[in-house]
Amino acid sequence: MTDTLEHAYDHPAPNGRLVHHYGPNVHILSDPWALGVLGRLCSPSTHPPILHDLVIACYRRLFNAVAAEQLPSTIRHVPTRMAANEPRAVATGSALDPTHQVVVVDVMRAGILPSQVLQRELLCVMDPERVRVDHLLMQRVTDAVTGHVSGVDLLGAKIGGSVDGATVLIPDPMGATGGSIHDVIAHYRAHVGEPRAIVCLHLIVTPEYLKRVTALGPTVQIYALRVDRGLSTPDVLAAVPGERWAEERGLDPHDYIVPGAGGVGELIYNAFV
């Protein structure tokens, strides 16, 4: 029987990153811990509250990678409790710049929980006045006959100010078609400001998503735990991810990801609409 399964993740990558041909702005964290947690999250036997805990764990892992590579740092000198008795008790090292503005964009519904995770992680080290969470209410528009996603509706937004010079983080668990992220970025660029960088954080992305979002320019970075191309032909699956990008397929006729995880927003909130 022809092998139709993905084998890109069979062996841990030496640097914890998937080798691919999607370009320098795509970062797939192919490490055994993250893939193990994500596999459990995707299982049909996993339900809240364990599902919530796994989403939180995955986003903390994604944030660690993003913070190390995409957020500005500075040298900090922090006197410790020992400084009362010893003047040399000063912890010195590179740390995130607490004065840099970071804006987290909550793309409701699936993005609510991840955006809270990122906010809390940022507040551990950043000036609270420099961390903001914006909210956008969006929903897919689907064709009534085919079920295919035909667009995205922006139903409402609560945005707290400019993003000029800021780093914008967009955590959205499933990067399927790229429609939502495309429209979020277009809205911010047209109406809110020009950020220093835009970083999209996903549990899973598809080749179709990557094709659409990487076209948005070099200031857009994409981080994910896995790229799913499960509807590709066996010979395409045998190639390095992205090597035959135009032939890779990860979306079913209803634009759900295969193998994917199902509708994560529906699963998190037990609201299947």
Image (tube, rainbow, N blue to C red):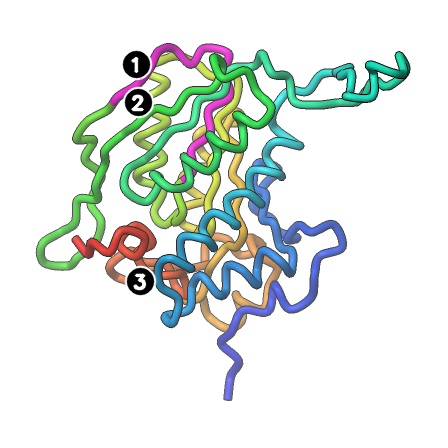
Name the secondary structure under disc 1: helix
| Location of residue 59 with respect to 197 vertically, above or below | below
**Marks 3 and 2 close (CB-CB < 8 Å):** no
Q: Is label 2 in a helix, a strand or a loop? A: helix
- In the picture, the disc for residue 252 is 3
Q: Label 1: which residue?
A: 191
Neighbour tally class for label 3: few under 14, some 14-19, many 20 plus, Cα within 10 Å: few
| Residue type highlighted by circle 3 | Asp
Magenta stretch: includes residue 160 = yes
Q: Tell which of 46 and 155 is nearer to you.
A: 46
Vertical placement of residue 181 versus 51, above or below: above
Of 6 and 87, the residue lying toward us: 87
Question: Magenta region: which residues?
Answer: 158-171
Q: Residue at x 44, y 43 (%)?
A: 211
Decide which of 6, 44 is in the foreground and name it: 44
Q: Residue at x 42, y 20 (%)?
A: 132
